Image (cartoon, coloured by chain):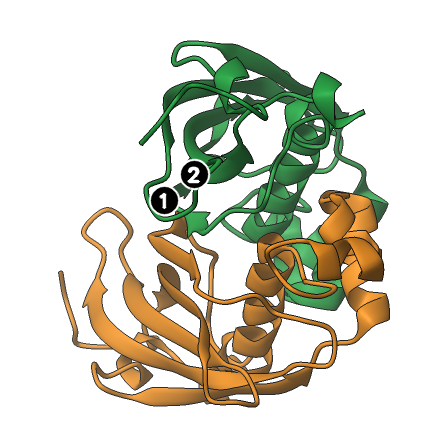
Chain colours: A green, B orange
Amino acid sequence: MSAEKLSLEDFEPGRRFPLGPKLVLAEEIIEFASEFDPQPMHIDEAAGRASILGGLAASGWHTSAMLMRMMADSYIVNALCEGAPGIDVMEWRKPVLAGDRLQGQSLVLEARPMRSRPGMGIVKFRHELENQRGELVCVSENSVMIRMRPGSELSA
Amino acid sequence: MSAEKLSLEDFEPGRRFPLGPKLVLAEEIIEFASEFDPQPMHIDEAAGRASILGGLAASGWHTSAMLMRMMADSYIVNALCEGAPGIDVMEWRKPVLAGDRLQGQSLVLEARPMRSRPGMGIVKFRHELENQRGELVCVSENSVMIRMRPGSELSA
């Protein structure tokens, strides 16, 4: 099974992976925010409309988590992935409102073997999500640890 | 009610707000990951132990969401907060494992009125979370939009 999974060698710079589409439901916005970010504009429709966000709006942390799920479905769960050290860039460019449909892509910026962990590499991605009006709502960059193919000739 | 909430003027640089404590339960790790980051080390105890994380480990996106909840409980929900444009720094320094107890603080780095939005300011924070062994597990910086006190004399 592992042999068929994506390894470091599959993440050539310039390769793109599709993200979404993901329809963002009001119930999901409220459920996430009730647990993690209970500000009025994320849990109440009227408060959202009255805010500068203009409607019931997903917490940015929820948008980030939805991005992760889109990555997981597109390539992460199918890769020899060992986790990530953090997020380099996370920009919430526009509000994500109930009923929005998000989709986008992950672009491989860089992929290299790690000196500190034999057999492991780091892949740096740039992720972009647009809404149904083609507006860029989220831009992110992060690096992910991905194993090299067993017996690979790449070295750090 | 608003008059008693924290406004831009209350976020003096150098002021600290406590975060947590938050006990991280295995069920919460699995529930979050099942929805947003279904990688084996986040949803299965044995897979977590076999991974480089060393146990059932919270998704970094989950740790980030827990951080947001700790901020909400400490000061955000009690502030005239209008959202955030993104995350400047998010480092997942150590694994967050089931049973860990997280706590830390938010430090105000900078607070200034926004030129583009009268009556609104930007507060930049540095957040740190430690586990029960005093190990720094998460370091983050982000900026939050917070309203000035009505009639405030501060100007951009």
In this figure, which residue is indicated by the disc labeled 1?
Answer: A88
Near-viewer residue (A110 or B129)? A110
What residue type is disc 1 on?
Answer: Asp
Residue with the most extreme front position: A151
Q: Which residue is tagged 2?
A: A142
Q: Secondary structure at mark 2?
A: strand
Query: What is the quadrant of the C terminus of chain B in the image?
Result: bottom left
Q: Position of residue A79 (x, y in %)?
A: 65, 28
Up-down relation of residue B151 to residue A152 (above or below): below
Q: Quadrant of residue A105?
A: top right
Residue A77 sits in quarter: top right
Badge 2 and badge 1 both on one subunit: yes
The quarter of the displayed image where residue A40 is located: bottom right
Q: Indicate the chain on which mark 1 is placed.
A: A
Q: A49 above or below A69? A: below
Do the CB atoms of the residues marked 2 and 1 lie less than 8 Å apart?
Answer: yes
